[in-house]
Image: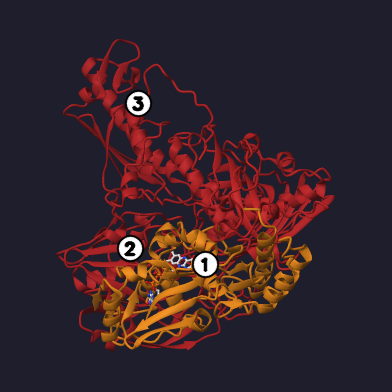
Chain colours: A orange, B red
């Protein structure tokens, strides 16, 4: 088994072009667990012979704001800890909140947004935020680069459109003008996989509300009926939402969930949790202030 | 963590030395465990050692049609492949009944049962060798319902049958009734010990052939040795055990796991072999806490005095007996809790199923009983219109009261004091979320699911009684050797140090009794008599008693020697600080000087008083002694999402005498964390006999954000029956903390009419709180 440590995106792409089956390793917080558990193998017959460790690729570890200040491009190698720091935390508050829910400080120091996408678990905490923001995912391979919508990027449980030899370079999200936040239910108060999660983002200028749900379907799902209901029923002028509207919004969001029963929770509870979280998120967004 | 301690009166003629009884010297291995330099069993190595690994059954119940190991042999680097056919001695082992095969030969009875083992040059080679072993199974119908085992509707899954033990207790008038009757059926899930320092061993065969030396993280070296030697077909003196570094145990290291396999491979190869489990294998490789279903019905007078308790216990022991019969004994004999109860009818079953085997875990059957009896006490309080503290005080047991087994409680029994002192501890002085309304401090924590307005606070109580030491006629003695020479003491014992701190208090005892400051601890191994198991909260009492007695004998020799030299009566000599003094004269000799050039060496076996088996009506003095504790929990609950945040645990624990207060506090905090885990998150989930969460991603343990501050009072009433006045303190903290937390959750969920929610199952899951209708079959 060989480990390639590229220092630039060019080198990384070349290394992958030369070894299309290689394992891309970023923070390793998913990949190493899978290797240690024997779910994933490297250096054996029928498994990748080469590991491309991308954590020193400067381009992946940086972010840029477009000149108009309306779109933020975050390198795939940016860590959760970095997403929680300013100014990124103010640019995309929901992503900072979601990052704060990921694992422990050690995991947040190593784990990356690109790795979250690469794994594409329905419980990935970065993903509902990217979905709510209609993020674009930038990919690079030997034959060039391409950009896909995050909705198209996610195909199924741990399945993406990533082609062999392709690397995720960055994601681009719009900077919205409006409240946004993230909620996640798990069975303990920290360091836990989401049994259900939701990201809500408001865009005042377009009077739109977006809500994306995690851990309740094979991939992250949006709740379009809830979104259009909210857009039509929120008191945009007063910045207020009445309890009946919030309640109906929760019910519609829950109706968009397609949860399963498993050893972590029941489908019924997951759906219920989406109902409650969606309602509370909308109330937080439109009763404005209560910071807690 | 804020700690409230009872003031202690100490004799202060001379300044108290630091390392003596009643002080809190630090653990000798503490720093090493924190900075990572401590050598755990898995860090052991030997020149040229091969690696061993285990092939395990993928089926809960199947007949083995054939095992073909030929392909494994062909892999480069494979040194040995062994199966049941290669076990030279006894084919089975076990702590009470020897019913568990070293390797399954004809039938596998649980997912994870060992079928074969390999040794090779590298763990990766081992892995490939295991994959290359071809086992053909014929799947059988698994027995997964304990009631079917009791009803006899499933064919026996083991030659010993499907019922491991049935025990009845009938006390007083079985037809007695009370004006108030409350009943409930309670369920306890399967908890894992989840210790640090996974199972690991190094076996080194003797160079001349014959015997073997095993370095192993275990709870009881001598018991292991007996079982291992029998399976190896060797005399016991050819099997020597040395304690490897242990991270924790909590009962999971009482049974044999990889001991026999490692020795077999080493003897087969004539070279050292290491084996080590990873976390997933550890879940399969050791026994767990028994899942239980307990029905209880309490009869009481209108003002809440217990008249009679009826109960039925069903413990799922899994595939092999392990200590199930003793766990059942503990469960049924603790039905009443720390309360008086004149009449009782109790029926208990421990059965075999094709689930993971269950055995010892901290609390040992009493955890299950306590969740039921404390839930019942709260129901009784509601039915009688009393508060939870009142109802408990109304019924508290005292020294001299008889148990439902007829045994009289001779131990110091400060139950009332534990309750009152707990009640006197301050409640949290901060509102929900804390003064700064930090979302991290709300239920849901980092997930930011709740705002302050969504959260309600509840308070709940749990009080418990726990037997100390082994029961039912078992002679679980302990041995210690004390050697005093040139002012230095060397202590030798086989007491497994599993984190409880015996290595700290052993030195404290010697320093106190012999007036020396320098105490060396010899290697912990089978080179001295048995110490019994590090379990049942017994080592402070038993091995503490043995070290105490050995030191006292050495002190007698020392006094004789000094008396001889100075023409005195040894009876008039005493240790004062680090000197030998004549209580009737002026003589004062430093112990160091008095022992120069002298060697005093004594070995003592300490025994507790004898106990007896229960008769068919569950009557008999089966337990040695008892300890008590009260817990009060304050819990914030988000009723809609079913998430909880334990805010504070207050506790007053009957410790007899705190030999090392810091160590006692460590046991209290750790035990409460484990009790909290059972209350709200820890459970091994098995579906169709297959474990679904054999990892720490899905088997959740409390984090720092889940563990609340603990305020503790040590109730110190030295027990005259305990050699040092000190009771075991390890188990009580995890026993009644669980029901206290659940009671607090119920309290927070009271409806407008003040009715609490039943919540009859632990761990309480978010859906049990949030979705009405799933919480309770009978509520
Ligand atoms: C203890 C623990 C707790 C955790 N808690 C959480 C949690 O609360 N929430 C959560 O969402 N996740 C959690 N995780 C999972 C993990 O931390 C995240 O999914 C993280 O985002 C993975 O990032 P990484 O950089 O470590 O990815 P890696 O493990 O390095 O890679 C993950 C996958 O993505 C691929 N990959 C990585 N980078 C790229 C790239 N640039 N281009 C193409 N493919 C790439 C890899 O090949 C691999 O398949 C936890 C993990 C652990 C060990």
Label 2 to label 3, Cα distance in Å?
Answer: 39 Å
Q: Is residue B564 left or right of residue A85?
A: left
Q: Tell which residue pokes out farthest to the left in this image.
A: B208
Which badge, 2 or 3, is on the more N-terminal residue?
Answer: 3
> Is residue B184 placed above or below B741 in the rendered structure?
below
Whole-percent x and y of residue A249? 72, 71
Judged from the image, the secondary structure of the residue bearing numbered disc 3 is loop
Q: Nearer the viewer, mark 3 or mark 1?
A: 1
Whole-percent x and y of residue B181? 80, 54
| Residue labelled with disc 3 | B17
Q: Disc 1 beta carbon < 8 A from ligand 1?
A: yes
The answer to whether one can see residue B618 in this image is no
Label 1 to label 2, Cα distance in Å?
Answer: 29 Å
Tell me the quarter of the image containing the C terminus of chain B.
Answer: bottom right
What residue is at 66 percent from the left and 53 percent from the top? A290
Residue B619's label in the rendered image is: none
The crowd level at tag 3 (other Cα within 10 Å; few <14, some 14-19, many 20+) is: some
Whole-percent x and y of residue B193? 47, 59
| Residue labelled with disc 2 | B200
The crowd level at tag 1 (other Cα within 10 Å; few <14, some 14-19, many 20+) is: many
| Residue labelled with disc 1 | A193
């Amino acid at each position: 088994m060989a480990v390639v440590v590229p220092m630039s995106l060019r080198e990384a792409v070349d290394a992958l072009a030369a070894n299309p089956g290689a394992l891309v390793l970023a923070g390793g917080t998913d990949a190493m667990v899978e290797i240690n558990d024997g779910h994933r193998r490297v250096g054996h017959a029928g498994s990748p012979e080469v590991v491309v460790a991308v954590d020193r690729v400067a381009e992946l570890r940086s972010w840029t704001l477009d000149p108009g200040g309306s779109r933020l491009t975050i390198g795939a190698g940016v860590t959760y800890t970095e997403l929680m720091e300013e100014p990124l935390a103010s640019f995309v508050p929901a992503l900072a909140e979601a990052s704060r829910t990921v694992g422990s400080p050690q995991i947040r120091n190593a784990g990356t947004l690109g790795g979250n996408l690469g794994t594409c678990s329905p419980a990935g905490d970065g993903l509902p935020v990217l979905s709510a923001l209609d993020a674009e995912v930038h990919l690079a391979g030997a034959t060039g680069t391409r950009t896909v919508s995050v909705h198209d990027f996610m195909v199924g449980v741990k399945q993406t459109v990533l082609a062999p030899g392709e690397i995720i370079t960055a994601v681009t999200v719009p900077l919205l003008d409006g409240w946004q936040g993230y909620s996640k239910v798990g069975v303990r108060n920290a360091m836990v996989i989401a049994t259900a999660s939701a990201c809500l983002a408001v865009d005042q200028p377009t009077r739109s509300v977006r809500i994306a749900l995690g851990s309740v379907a094979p991939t992250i799902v949006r709740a379009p009926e809830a979104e259009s209901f909210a857009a039509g029923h929120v008191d945009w002028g007063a910045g207020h939402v009445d309890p009946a509207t919030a309640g109906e919004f929760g019910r519609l969001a829950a109706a968009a969930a397609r949860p399963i029963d498993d050893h972590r929770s029941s489908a019924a509870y997951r759906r219920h949790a989406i109902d409650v979280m969606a309602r509370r998120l909308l109330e937080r967004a439109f009763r404005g202030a209560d910071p807690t | 963590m804020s700690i409230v301690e009872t003031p202690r009166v100490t004799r202060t003629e001379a300044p108290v030395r630091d390392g003596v009884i009643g002080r809190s010297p630090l653990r000798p291995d503490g720093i090493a465990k924190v900075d990572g330099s401590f050598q755990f069993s898995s860090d052991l190595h030997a020149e040229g050692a091969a690696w061993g690994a285990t092939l395990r059954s993928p089926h809960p119940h199947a007949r083995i049609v054939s095992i073909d190991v030929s392909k494994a042999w062909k892999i480069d680097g494979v040194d040995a492949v062994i199966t049941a056919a290669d076990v030279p001695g006894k084919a089975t082992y076990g702590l009470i009944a020897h019913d568990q095969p070293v390797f399954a030969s004809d039938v596998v009875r649980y997912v994870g049962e060992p079928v074969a083992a390999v040794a090779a040059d590298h763990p990766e080679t081992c892995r490939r060798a295991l994959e290359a072993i071809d086992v053909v199974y014929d799947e059988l119908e698994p027995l997964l319902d304990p009631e079917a085992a009791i009803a006899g509707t499933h064919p026996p899954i083991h030659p010993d049958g499907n019922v491991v033990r049935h025990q009845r207790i009938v006390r007083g008038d079985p037809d007695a009734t009370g004006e108030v009757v409350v009943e409930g059926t309670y369920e306890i899930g399967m908890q894992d010990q989840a210790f640090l320092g996974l199972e690991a061993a190094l076996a080194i065969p003797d160079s001349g052939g014959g015997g073997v030396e095993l370095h192993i993280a275990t709870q009881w070296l001598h018991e292991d040795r007996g079982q291992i030697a029998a399976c190896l077909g060797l005399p016991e003196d050819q099997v020597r055990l040395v304690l490897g570094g242990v991270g924790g145990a909590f009962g999971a290291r009482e049974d044999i796991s990889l001991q026999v396999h490692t020795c077999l491979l080493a003897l087969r190869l004539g070279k050292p072999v290491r084996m080590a489990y990873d976390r997933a294998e550890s879940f399969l490789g050791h026994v767990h806490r028994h899942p239980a279903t307990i029905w209880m019905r309490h009869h009481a007078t209108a003002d809440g005095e217990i008249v009679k308790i009826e109960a039925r216990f069903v413990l799922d022991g899994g595939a092999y007996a392990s200590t199930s019969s003793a766990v059942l004994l503990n469960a049924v004999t603790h039905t009443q809790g720390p309360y008086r109860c004149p009449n009782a009818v109790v029926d208990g079953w421990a059965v075999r199923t094709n689930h993971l085997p269950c055995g010892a875990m901290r609390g040992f059957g009493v955890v299950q009983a306590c969740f039921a009896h404390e839930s019942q006490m709260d129901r009784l309080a509601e039915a009688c219109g009393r508060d939870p503290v009142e109802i408990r005080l109304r019924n508290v047991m005292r020294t001299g009261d008889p148990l439902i087994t007829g045994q009289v409680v001779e131990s110091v029994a400060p139950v009332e004091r534990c309750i009152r002192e707990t009640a006197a501890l301050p409640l949290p002085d901060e509102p929900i979320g804390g003064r700064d309304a930090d979302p991290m401090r709300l239920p849901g924590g980092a997930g930011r699911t709740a705002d302050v307005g969504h959260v309600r606070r509840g308070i709940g109580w749990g009080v418990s009684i726990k037997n100390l030491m082994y029961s039912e006629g078992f002679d679980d003695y302990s041995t210690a050797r004390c050697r005093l020479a040139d002012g230095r003491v060397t202590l030798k014992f086989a007491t497994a140090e599993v984190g409880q701190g015996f290595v700290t208090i052993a030195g404290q005892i010697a320093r106190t009794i012999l007036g020396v400051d320098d105490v060396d601890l010899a290697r912990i191994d089978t080179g001295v008599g048995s110490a019994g198991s590090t379990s049942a909260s017994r080592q402070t009492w038993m091995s503490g008693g043995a070290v105490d007695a050995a030191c006292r004998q050495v002190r007698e020799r020392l006094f004789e020697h000094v008396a001889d030299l100075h023409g005195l009566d040894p009876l008039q000599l005493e240790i004062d600080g680090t000197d030998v003094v004549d209580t009737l004269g002026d003589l004062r000799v430093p112990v160091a000087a008095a022992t120069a050039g002298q060697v005093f060496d004594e070995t003592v076996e300490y025994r507790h008083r004898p106990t007896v088996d229960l008769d068919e009506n569950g009557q008999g003095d089966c337990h040695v002694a008892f300890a008590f504790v009260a817990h009060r929990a304050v819990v914030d609950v988000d009723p809609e999402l079913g998430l909880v945040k334990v805010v504070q645990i207050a506790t007053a624990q009957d410790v007899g005498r705190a030999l090392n207060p810091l160590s006692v506090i460590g046991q209290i905090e750790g035990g409460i964390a484990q009790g909290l885990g059972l209350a709200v998150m820890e459970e091994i989930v098995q579906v169709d006999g297959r474990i679904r969460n054999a990892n720490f991603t899905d088997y959740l343990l409390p984090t720092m954000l889940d563990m609340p501050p603990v305020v503790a009072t040590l109730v110190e009433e030295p027990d005259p029956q305990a050699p040092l006045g000190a009771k075991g303190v390890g188990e009580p903290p995890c026993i009644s903390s669980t029901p206290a937390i659940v009671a607090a959750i119920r309290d927070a969920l009271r409806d407008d009419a003040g009715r609490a929610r039943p919540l009859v199952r632990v761990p309480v899951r978010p859906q049990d709180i949030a979705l009405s209708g799933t919480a309770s079959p009978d509520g």
